[in-house]
Amino acid sequence: GQLTCLELCDVKPWRSASLDQVLNVLRALPLLEYLFIHECLPDSPPTDFCPVDGPIPLPNLIRLDLRDNLHTCAAFLQSLHKIPTAASMQVTAMGIENHHGVGVDDPPAEPPAADAIMTRSVLEAVAPCCSGTQTVAFSGFCRSASGFIDVKCWSHEVEEHTDLHAASQTKGHFALSTHGPVAQIVADFVHVLALRSARVLACEVVDYDAYHAEIWADVFAHLPGIETLHVNAQLLAVLVNGSPSALPALRTLVLARAIVSATLFDKLRRWLAAR
């Protein structure tokens, strides 16, 4: 077909179809440039799902906007063949509880372990498209085991923090919004996408669980190329309580909406002096 744009939103009959049937529709549309699919794919395909006729090639894809439960998002993305590296992608992957009616501001207290596994599967599916990432942004909150997290990356440097939202439609942009164990999702994001080439990091996650400090320290350790860091006071404390060798390329530090106590400021001073 000659179709270049397809938008599907809450198409209920597709929910009762098989994922293979849906994929075969896309297989007949190799010229697609814009694909929007919101909550109309079949629910929860098998975790080892594989398209009967092989992965779907969409070589001209410019923009993909996908919103569904984690299992379905993971299966769909893994069914695409070599997503173009210049494509812009927005994936809103809801956990099982959220998908069946829990509001986005009310994450489940104990997210299923399967959600964390499926989130990792989503990241593995898009990893080849993020190999040249230059800018990374994390925002969200975490209470106890669960929270909401919005993670984004761009294939170019976004110089000003205020430009992060404006840059969200540019090519080479990937964004994932989901619920789950926030610190672990961020760690998986950094590890799976191998973001060692990133130069700009904006990290504004409010994490109420002090036990996650080790995970956040590991995140910083796996981003050695960061030259510009936007961070809140909470995660700044994690950074300065750790090794002075973290973020060895750091040149610009921006405290975003941070209330810095005298004690934290003194730790920052000593951390900088030790570098």
Image (cartoon, helix red, strand yellow):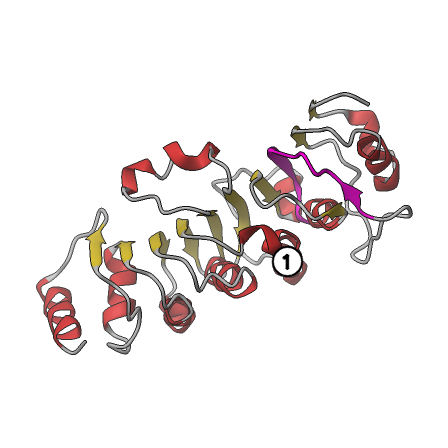
Q: Quadrant of residue 212?
A: bottom left
**Magenta-colored stretch includes residue 64:** yes
Percent position of residue 79, x then y = 77, 47
Q: Report whether 98 appears left or right of 155.
A: right
The residue at which mark 1 appears reads as 124
Percent position of residue 8, x then y = 71, 25
Q: Quadrant of the N terminus?
A: top right
Q: Residue at x 20, y 52 (%)?
A: 255
Q: Residue at x 41, y 72 (%)?
A: 218
Percent position of residue 235, x then y = 30, 61
User: In this view of the protein, which residue sits in the foreground, 100 or 184?
Assistant: 184
User: In this view of the protein, which residue sits in the foreground, 77 or 173?
Assistant: 173
Q: Residue at x 17, y 53 (%)?
A: 259
The range drawn in magenta is 55-70
Q: Report whether 126 appears left or right of 19.
A: left
User: In this view of the protein, which residue sits in the foreground, 226 or 263?
Assistant: 226
State the residue lying farthest toward the right.
Answer: 52
Relative to 74, is 48 above or below?
below
Percent position of residue 129, x then y = 58, 50
Q: Quadrant of the C terminus?
A: bottom left
Relative to 73, is 234 above or below?
below
Q: How many marks?
A: 1
Q: Report whether 244 appears left or right of 157.
A: left
Q: Residue at x 87, y 41 (%)?
A: 20
**Magenta-colored stretch includes residue 130:** no
Q: Check disc 1 and report its element: helix, strand or loop.
A: helix
Relative to 211, is 126 above or below?
above
Q: Please state which amino acid type lies under the numbered disc 1.
A: Glu
Relative to 226, is 88 above or below?
above
Q: Report whether 7 appears left or right of 208.
A: right
